[in-house]
Image (cartoon, rainbow, N blue to C red):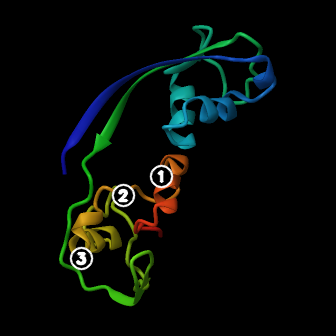
Amino acid sequence: MTTNTQQIDLTHQVTSEETGFRLDKISALAFDGFSRSQLQQWITSGELTVNGEKQKAKYRVKTDDKLVLQAVLTEHSTAQAENIDIDIIYEDDDVLVINKPVGMVVHPAVGNWTGTLVNALLYHYPKQSHLPRAGRNAQKWQSRIQEKRLLLIY
């Protein structure tokens, strides 16, 4: 596994329609390319500030507040394909149904970088490795559903 880092420098000016939202909620809307969990970590660490000052996640934003996100994003490389048997129940051009064994970890994470369902799927369907995990950046891949491409949804 390799690690890449990326400097993030983003800003968002709070509009009158957004006034009263909690900082953590408006941040998820304004900086939608990141998970809410990641944004909350940046709020806590002071890497996501309001008008140059560290605030708590529950802070209620005001019109013209300036949200500034200056952080380093650490990205781990994508999962590696592994020849792991999977029990395919049904498959067509749009859908893949798998009987996942009890105890099999779904996607790589700390402590489980190998032997996961994603590792197996990448081996059996290497042309689909570019597809995002469902639930992450859902709006960005929604058009792919309309194009009837196979998605790895789990």
Image: 109 above or below 125:
above
Q: Are marks 2 and 3 in contact (CB under 8 Å)?
A: no
- Mark 2 or mark 1: which comes first in sequence? 2
Amino acid type for the residue under numbered disc 2: Leu
Q: Nearer the viewer, residue 94 or 9?
A: 94
In what element is the residue under mark 3?
helix
Query: Does residue 15 appear to the left or right of 106 in the view shown?
Result: right
Question: Which numbered disc covers residue 124?
Answer: 3
Estimate the x, y position of residue 132 in percent, counting from the top left: 40, 55
Q: Are marks 3 and 1 in contact (CB under 8 Å)?
A: no
Q: Are marks 2 and 1 in contact (CB under 8 Å)?
A: yes
Estimate the x, y position of residue 133 in percent, counting from the top left: 43, 58
Image: 139 above or below 65:
below
The residue that disc 2 covers is 131
The residue that disc 1 covers is 141
What is the CA distance from the residue labelled 2 to the residue labelled 3? 14 Å
In what element is the residue under mark 2?
loop
Image: 143 above or below 84:
above
